[in-house]
Structures are given as structure tokens and as C-alpha cells.
Image: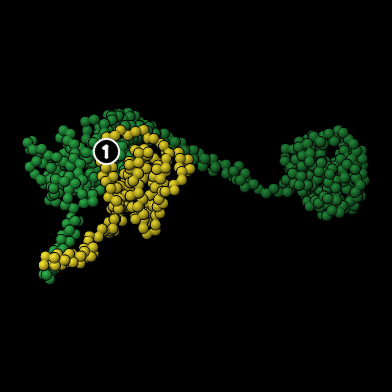
Amino acid sequence: LSHVMATTFFRSIFRVLPLLLLLSPVNSSSCAMGNRTTQIREKYENILSHDIDELVNMSAEYRDRCCKNKKHENSKVFFCNDTQEIESLQSMACNMLRFFHKQKISKDYRWKAALVSCGTLQVLQCKCERHKKDKVCMQVNTHNKDTEKSEQSKKKCNQEFCELKENISSLRSCWNKFEKIIFR
Amino acid sequence: MLKMTQMSTVLSIFVLFLRTTFGESGCTSADGDGTFVDDEPDNFDIDCFSQLEFKDSYSSLTCNFTELPPHNTNYTLALCTKEDGNYVCFNMEKQEEAYFLQFTDILSNKDICMDSETKRRVCRSLVVTDIVKPEVPFDINITYQKEANEYLIHYSTPHSWKKYLKDKLIHQIAYQKEGGTWKTIETPYLQIKLLGKNLENDASYEVKVRSQPNGDYFKGMWSEWSTSKSFRTAREQHSTESYNSMVVVIFSILGFMLSIVMIVLIITFWENRIKPAVWPKLPDHKKTLEQLCKKPKNNFDISFNPESFGYVHIHKVDGIRAKAELENFLQPSTALETNLTEKFRSGSDLRMNLAMTDKSNLNLSVTYGGIWPAEALHRLLGTNQFAVTEGNCSSSTYEVCHSNRVPLCDDGFNLSSTPLLDPSGLPGPESLNGDTTSQMVSTGEMRSPNNEEAYVTMSSFYKIQ
């Protein structure tokens, strides 16, 4: 009898399993739904656009010849797809967060890049697939930067720096494209 | 058995339902102490303001209690952000009577929470961009513009070289006379002008400035007042004005008087001088010729009245032909030529033109009816006596022969056919002016007769000129 009961129990569980899978909380889209065009426009126009400009100016301080000879074989190429600008910006911002811990890049530069990434995710109300990256934003939004004395900007040219620089450029271009849409 | 199966199914579904609903509630807390955020509205009175880009990329939040809490109780203020269902809080640092915190994220919505030993955490929503307090303006400069009698007040703000609040501030300028009341002016620009006429002369004034977000996106409160700057207004504002007005009055009077004088002069000299100059009369050929042919001496009768020449035979002619054959018939007479040259120097073109002009090219259109009396011709030509017969050109009188390029007279030089160039009677082209005419008459009348004669007509005068 106990054997039969156990078998029955497990059968019921197995039947429920598909139901569980079906009713399991489906992760909502990683970006908030809803028409938030006005809010996005205001935050971008008054705050985020200035941060992006400042980051681009920091990129310009490096020599132009720095990344011309660098071959980005393994680097991802991000496109700003039509009608999918928000998703494209989310991908770019999440990818930029992985550079936050790259020691070869100057601290100020990667810290500022992380700030822009987190700001982009905040404005668009998006999350990254890997939750670890969101912890970077938590760290960036604190004043931990002051705990370590900001080193003199090492304007070194390396593969990771060039990848980050290219990522920043793509992010800015995609925001410019999205801006024209939301400013209509 | 069936019942057990049903029960397990129901139990599974129930557990699933609970997991689904509670999983999204965000009831967890980051600090892990299990305390839950109280959603009750604020029941603590604190005033907070934010300062953007306070230091580098950091912004700051400063809060203080409007009602001081009991001294025995320790309170903690924290700035909390909800991220991914987690409530992340950062405690504010207590500085004397205020609480202070630096942070970077000004995009996300935040809560200000108060913790105390006796009460649960109480939170209130906080929008950092709505409680912005700008930094204090500085470096006030006052410049007096004498010509315009204005005082230019210029100042600076630290936000000019920052990102967020640049060109998004309203500035308030307050000024007062020493011992007087404050007056304020608001402007979005970094300078303003005070009119001198609105200020007292030779008085001491004080100026100070403060700023506030313009409210388009960033809202907030006035900054602290800047350091006051004093200045003294000019002393001679009124005298300068009165001097300028006096100069204007004097110039107006002078202009008026000048215009009156001009009008009187115009009226006075209109008929005699102005009108002839503006509207010159068309020359009358008769009078002009009379002027040209000034009354010569010695009984030269110059008149166009046929009755005056009753004693001579007058042959009516159609016109005048100017003979250009002077050189062929002229005797080389240096004296006369020299005289003639002198006379015609100013109009030397006449001789040149006559010399160069072929008689066939002469097209004299002026009709001239006049005959030199023989006596005059005799005097001019000296001993040459010519007997002319009436009825033809070779008469004792010189006739001006003219036709349409067809000489009425012989081509040879004779008194009848040659164009008479009487230095006394028919002066050169320049003697269309009266002065030269008289000169020629006075100086050349009794010169030795010269065969260099030419008939010059009015038309050739005009042409040559």
C-alpha cells in the first residue's frame, strides 16, 4: 500500500510539473513596458546626454591612432536595430558593464562608462540578463570611488580600452537615433 | 488513492500560486534584518535639499529636522533606492544639526527613511531633481557706462562650467541704497543693467545675487545670497543731461535761423542769379552775334538790320560757307599769324580745325546774312583793292557765301569767296564769350592785313567748342 501511495504521489507531482512550468513566473521583459516616452526624453535630455558627452570627451583625450591598429576579432558588434532601439541600448549598456572590473583601463574612464551604462538602464527601466552586472550599478552609485585615490589617468592603449571605446561610440549613436524618435 | 492524488495536485497548485505572488512583492530587504519598509505617509518633518555636481560627479543631499527630536533618542536618516526588488539604503552622515550624504545616481527614484531606536523605519519618497539648491554666485562686478548713464552688473556662477544646471538657472539681483529698502530684479543671464535715472546721484548702493533652478526640469529653492558689493553712483548725471539738452537747443535754434536766412537769400536772388543759373535761357543768335561782333572801331557797321546797309548792295545768300582754304591763299605773315595764334590760342582748335578741314567736308548750316563793308575790308587787307561788282560774289563787299557744300563763290582766294577771318570782326571760337571778343576787337582790329582769313560761322563755333 505504501508503495502504491508513493507511486501515486509521484505521478501527481509529475503531472503538476508541466503545470508548474506553465504557470512558473515568467520573467517579464527585461525592460519596463508602457509608454514612458516623456519620462525617458526628460531624463535623457537633462541628465544622461550630458554624461554621455562627457564620456565621449574623455575618449577623445586618447590618441586617435590608439585603436586603429587594434583588431577586434572577438569583440561583439552591436547594431542599433530599427524599432528595437531600446533593446539595442540595453544590450550595449549591459555589455559595457563588464569593463568595470578591467584593471587595464583607467579607473576614471571605466567608472564613468559604468555610470553611463547604469544611467541608460535606469532611464529605460531595463535589467541585464546577468544579475551580477546590476551589482555594478549598486557599486557605482555609491561613493566607493573616493575610497581609492583616483590614479593619474593612464592613457594606455590596449585591446580592452579599444573595445570599450567602440562600445561607447555605438551607445552614443544609438541614443542619437532613439532621440530623434522620441523627440518627434 | 484518488483523493490523495487530488490533494497533492491542489497543494502543488497552491504552493505555486503563493510563490508566484510573493516572489514579485519585494518584501525582502537588502540588509537582511527582516524589517519591512513602512508604506505609511511621512510622519516626520525634515527638510532636504540636493546639490548637483557638488564635487566632481557626486551630488549631495542635506537634510535637517524641522522639529528637533527628543535628545534622548538617536535617529538615523538613510537614502534608499529600490533596485530589482531590493531596497538599497545608504546612511547619511550627521554633521552638527544636519545630515549629509554624497551620491552619484540622480536618475532613480529615492526614499528618505528615518530610523530610530524606538520606532520602525519610516520612509518618504524623494525626488532629488525637485529639491535642487544651486551654488552661490560670486565675483560681482559693477561698471558705470557714462554715455548711457547705466550701471552694468556682472556676476558668475559655478554652474557655468558644470553639466546639469548650466543655462538652467534664474538669478535674482537685489540692490538697495544705503539705509533704504531692497529692490530685486530677476534674469536668466549673468549680467544686468541698472539705469542711472532710476538711481540717486552720488549715493552709495549695495548689490547681492542668488540663483534658483528655472523649473523646466530641475526645481528647487534659492541659493544663499552672494557676498554684497557696494558702489557709488555718479555725481554729474543731471548736469550731463542738462548740458546735452542745452546743446540740442542751441543747435536747433541755429538750424532754424540758418534756414530762415537761406529762404530770404533764395527769395532775394531768385530772379537775378539763381533762376538763370538753374534755368539758363536759350541763347538768342541775334544777341549772341551782336556780342561776338562787338562794335568795332572805325565805323564798322555791324547790324543785322538791312536798313543800316542801305548804301551797299546786299545779296541775299542762303548760308555761309566757311572756306578752309586759308593756307592755300594766305601769305606767310608771321606777325599776323602770331597775333592770330595768340588770339586763338585758347581756341587754337579753330585754326587747326580749319587747316585740317577740307572745304568739302565743311557743312555749315548757319545762315548768315551779312556783308562786310568794303572800307573795312580795305583796311584789313591793306593795299589790296578789290573791285567787286554787284551781283556776283566778286564784289567790293565781302559776301559770306554758303551753300550745301557747294561753294557759291570761286575757290580761289578772293575777297568774295574766302571765308573772312577778321580778327577784329569775326573772332575765333573762344570769342563766343564776350570777353574774348572784346579783346580781339581791341587788339586785332588794326593789325596788318593778313590774307589768313576765314569765315567762321556760328555753327563752326559750336562745333569747335
Residue A12: image quadrant is bottom left
In the image, B349 versus A72, the foreground residue is A72
* Residue at horizontal 67 percent and vertical 49 percent from the top: B282
Q: Which residue is mark 1?
A: A144
Chain holding disc 1 = A
Which quarter shows the N terminus of chain A? bottom left
* Residue at horizontal 11 percent and vertical 65 percent from the top: A2
Picture colour scheme: by chain
User: Measured from the top left, where is residue B233 in percent x and y?
Assistant: 31, 30
Vertical side of B370 occupied by B265: above or below: above
User: Measured from the top left, where is residue B303 in percent x and y?
Assistant: 78, 46
Can you see residue B95?
yes
Residue A156: image quadrant is top left
In the image, B106 versus B28, the foreground residue is B28
Give the chain ID for the yellow colour: A
Secondary structure beneath label 1: helix
Left or right for B112, reference B423: left
From the image, state the color of chain B.
Answer: green
Q: How many marks?
A: 1
* Residue at horizontal 17 percent and vertical 61 percent from the top: B16
In the image, A124 versus B212, the foreground residue is A124
Which quarter shows the C terminus of chain A? bottom left
Sort mark 1 into few (<14), some (14-19) or many (20+) by Cα contacts within 10 Å. Answer: few
The amino acid on which the numbered mark 1 sits, given as a three-letter code, is Asn
Left or right for B457, reference B19: right
Left or right for A39, reference B329: left
* Residue at horizontal 41 percent and vertical 48 percent from the top: A75
User: Measured from the top left, where is residue A155 in percent x and y?
Assistant: 41, 36
